[in-house]
Amino acid sequence: MKLWLVTGACILYLSLPLALALVCQECSNFPGSSGYSPCDSEPVSSTACGPYHDRCMTVRLSYPFAGSFEIRNCSASLSCDPNNELYLCNFAGTSDCSLDCCEGDMCNGVPGDAYYRRSAFLNRLFLERKRV
C-alpha cells in the first residue's frame, strides 16, 4: 500500500509541471524552419512551454530583399524586454522587427481564430470570477 502511495506521489510530482505549463501557438513562415506549421494555416499548432518560458510571443520580421516573416512560440520574459540584452529583436539582423509578448494560454493567437476566441473567453471568465 505504501509503495502505491509513494509511486502515485512521484508521478504527480513529475507530471505537475506539464499540467501547469503555459500553452502557446507554435508556427513559422520563416524559410528553413521545418517542423512548424505555417502561421496562416488553420488551425495553428500549439506547444506546451518549458519551465523557463513564461510568455507567448509573436515576432514579425521584414527583410528588404527577402520579405516579411512571422514566428509564434514560447518565450522567456527576459527576451520580451526591449531594455534587456537578450531582447529577441537584437538578434534578428534587421531593424524592422516587432515582438509582442503576452501571458496566458494561446494568447499569441490571431483575434478571430478558434483558439484565440476560446482562450479570450476563458481568460475573461476567470478574471470576472477573480474580481468578485
Image (cartoon, helix red, strand yellow):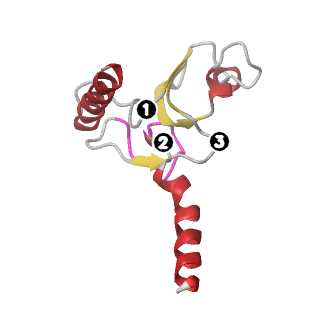
Which residue does the numbered mark 3 point to in the structure image? 52
**Residue type beneath disc 3:** Tyr
Which residue does the numbered mark 1 point to in the structure image? 104
Residue 71: x %, y % from top left? 49, 33
Residue 9: x %, y % from top left? 56, 69
First in sequence, mark 3 or 1: give its number: 3
Q: CA distance from mark 2 to mark 1?
A: 7 Å
**Residue type beneath disc 1:** Gly
**Which range is magenta?**
24-39
Q: CA distance from mark 3 to mark 1?
A: 15 Å
Residue 108: x %, y % from top left? 41, 30
Q: How many marks on residues?
A: 3
Using a 10 Å C-alpha cutoff, classify the residue at mark 2 as few (fewer than 14 neighbours), some (14 to 19) or many (20 or more): many
Which residue does the numbered mark 2 point to in the structure image? 22
- Residue at point 34% right, 19% down? 131
Q: Main secondary structure of the magenta part?
A: loop
Residue 30: x %, y % from top left? 50, 36
Classify 97 as above or below 125: above
Question: Element under label 2?
Answer: loop
